[in-house]
Image: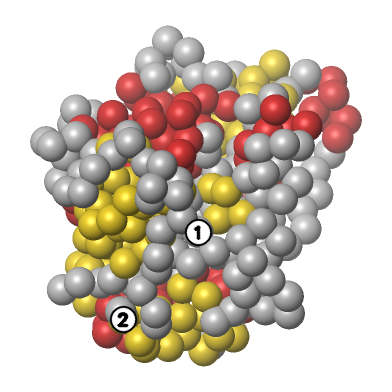
Amino acid sequence: MKAALYYARNDIRVEEFPNPKPGPEDVILKVDYCGICGTDLEEYRHGPILIPVDAPNPLTGVMAPLVLGHEFIGEVVEVGSRVTKYKVGDRLAPDVLLYCGECYWCKRHQVTMCDQMAALGLSGHGGLAQYCKAPVAMCIKVPDALRSDHAALAEPLAVAVRAVRKGRVQLGDVVAIFGGGTIGLLALQVARHAGAAAVYLVEPDPFRRKLALQLGAAGAIDPREGGAVEQLMAITCIGADVVIEATGVPTVVPQAIEATRKSGRVVLVGLPTGPSSFNFLSVVTTEKEIIGSLSHVYDEDFWAAVRMLADGRIEVDALISDRITLDDLIPRGLERLGQGRADVLKILVMPNA
């Protein structure tokens, strides 16, 4: 089969790779669509970060060259000997997280904290290939009414679902989101469906601010015009009930904390690109909560993401910037994303096109 293999920084090759074979509790998926994530771009430009290159991952036994891709959907073409839940022809979206199932965290169903946590496409062979092997336990069946290209956004949507869940957004809350990328724009929609009375997006780019308003934001704030914190305070008087930081930019994190009301909650979901600092005294004296949010849990966040996409509550067409072939992964995918263009959000790859 044809696959996109990560060898080293700036060295991803689309080439022939052996077809996967299922274990007893695996399915083989013919990949319909696979999204390119910012994490893929970071591995390409600055990696290896999460991809094992010196020794195999202890959970998967895989190391580079490794098939990328962790946002995908596919059709079952083969099942393992003990698989009864799904059959050939079913469309499945894999949650992609792998965990040991035995550690303290797994036994508490906190699988994102597993001491050996791994993921397809980063520490095991993923979905930027014509076929992919996935453990049946991580797969969610895609409802017939849900388009495959939309279902490919279930993974990033699950990240947004978890961030909103961790922030405990309640009916009537005012929510502020820093960052108008894919995760920020999905979190905007999830927060509205969770009952937020108003969601404000902080984003310097006019294209993304306009898109946020189309997706239901009560306001879109340009942080270059008077400061994001000052503008949010002018609107809310006391600050936002919940702030979701989705940029990962170190200088933005203190602003997100400052924009939160007393006793409010800050959810950090953006992956930091460097260290940050803030005044701990201001957090202590205002009893703000700072909450980390990592990835998603298969039967909570990922399941909810698939259902929200299926019933049309989440608009994703506006977030899909392009659909490309696997051969175009570098020039029209990774390189294009690396240009930092605001009008490029989610690029989907069609490995079998």
Specify the quadrant that holds the N terminus.
bottom left
The residue nearer to you, when weighing 300 against 21, is: 21
The three-letter amino acid code for the residue at tag 1 is: Leu
The residue nearer to you, when weighing 310 against 193, is: 310
Identify the residue at image location x=84%, y=39%: 279
The residue nearer to you, when weighing 8 against 161, is: 8
Secondary structure state at the residue bearing disc 2: strand
Secondary structure state at the residue bearing disc 1: loop
The structure's colour scheme is secondary structure
Identify the residue at image location x=69%, y=25%: 108
Q: Do the residues labelled 1 and 2 touch (CB within 8 Å)?
A: no
Residue position for label 2? 2
The three-letter amino acid code for the residue at tag 2 is: Lys
Q: What number is the disc on residue 120?
A: 1
- Is 107 displayed left or right of 98 in the figure? right
Indicate the position of residue 116 as horizontal and vertical percent values.
71, 50
Identify the residue at image location x=45%, y=42%: 138
Specify the quadrant of the image occupied by residue 65.
Answer: bottom right
Indicate the position of residue 95 as horizontal and vertical percent values.
44, 45
Name of the residue lying farthest toward the top: 171
